[in-house]
Image: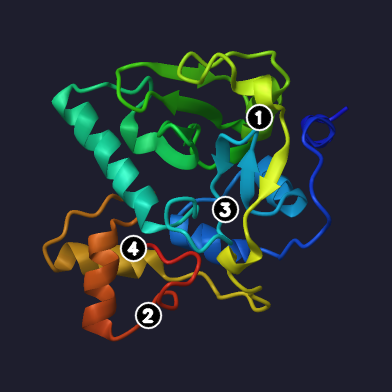
Amino acid sequence: MSPLDRLTELCPPPAARRQPVDWARVESALGTPLPGDYKQLTATYDPGCFAGYLWVYDPRHTSVHVNLVGSASDRIRQQMESDQARGIYPAPVDAALLLPCGATDNGEHLFWATAPQGRPDAWTIVVNEARGPRWFHFPGSLTEFLVAVLGGETAVPQFPADLLKGGTGFEPSDPDQWYPPMPTVTPPLDSAAIRAWGRANGFTVPLRGRIPSAVWRAWEKATGDEALPDGGPGRPC
């Protein structure tokens, strides 16, 4: 039985209302390919919550707090990098490798540890503590993590001891909180040109990975070009 089959056994998905995801657009905004298991997960489940506690970030959700490419994700990554630089609650991997992929009702965040780069199906999961120094590392995919936690095989120290007491069901978000389908694929942006523009205009821009949101905003303002529509999924700022 595959991890996804086991997850659907633990948490049956609701009646199909699923909308397609423009993965080319999303991956262009993030600057990285995404794991295959995550794409299968979003093809199986609508945006929503597992066990009344665990939210998987979804590019179809209107809330920046649970959108995979929302501005909240940018702020979380910046905070983790700032904490690491100051020696506060250091992550078990380089903070620059952390890509938020979920959250809990208590304020913990789930991250992909995006190493090795370019091999997303080999990424693992790390979880921070909402208001403390603890981190938890799970050596598997996001779907495998959900199965291990919801199946009672893995106890994450930061999670409530009675997490499974109320059951392991899945509750979808209100459809009004989803973005409408995007039937067309937007060609990938020329990120190399944007990086070069940023460096030429005094910005510090990494050679690879996600382009800082400040650079996107400045580039859009200077060129009059919107990388992605205002408020739409995949907007990198």
* Amino acid type of the residue tagged 3 in the rendering: Asp
Q: Nearer the viewer, mark 1 or mark 4?
A: 1
Q: Earlier in the sequence, mark 2 or mark 4?
A: 2
Gap between marks 2 and 4 measured at Cα: 11 Å
State the SS at label 4.
loop
* Amino acid type of the residue tagged 1 in the rendering: Leu
Give me the residue at 55% from left, 60% from top: 61
Q: What is the image's colouring?
A: rainbow
To which residue does mark 1 refer? 146
To which residue does mark 4 refer? 237
Q: Is residue 206 above or below residue 190?
A: above
Left or right for 96, reference 121: left
State the SS at label 3.
loop
Gap between marks 1 and 4 measured at Cα: 28 Å
To which residue does mark 3 refer? 58
Residue 49 % position (x, y): 62, 43
Q: Earlier in the sequence, mark 1 or mark 2?
A: 1
Gap between marks 1 and 3 measured at Cα: 15 Å
Residue 205 location, quadrant: bottom left
Quadrant (top left, top right, bottom left, bottom right) of the N terminus: top right
Give me the residue at 68% from left, 77% from top: 183
* Amino acid type of the residue tagged 4 in the rendering: Cys
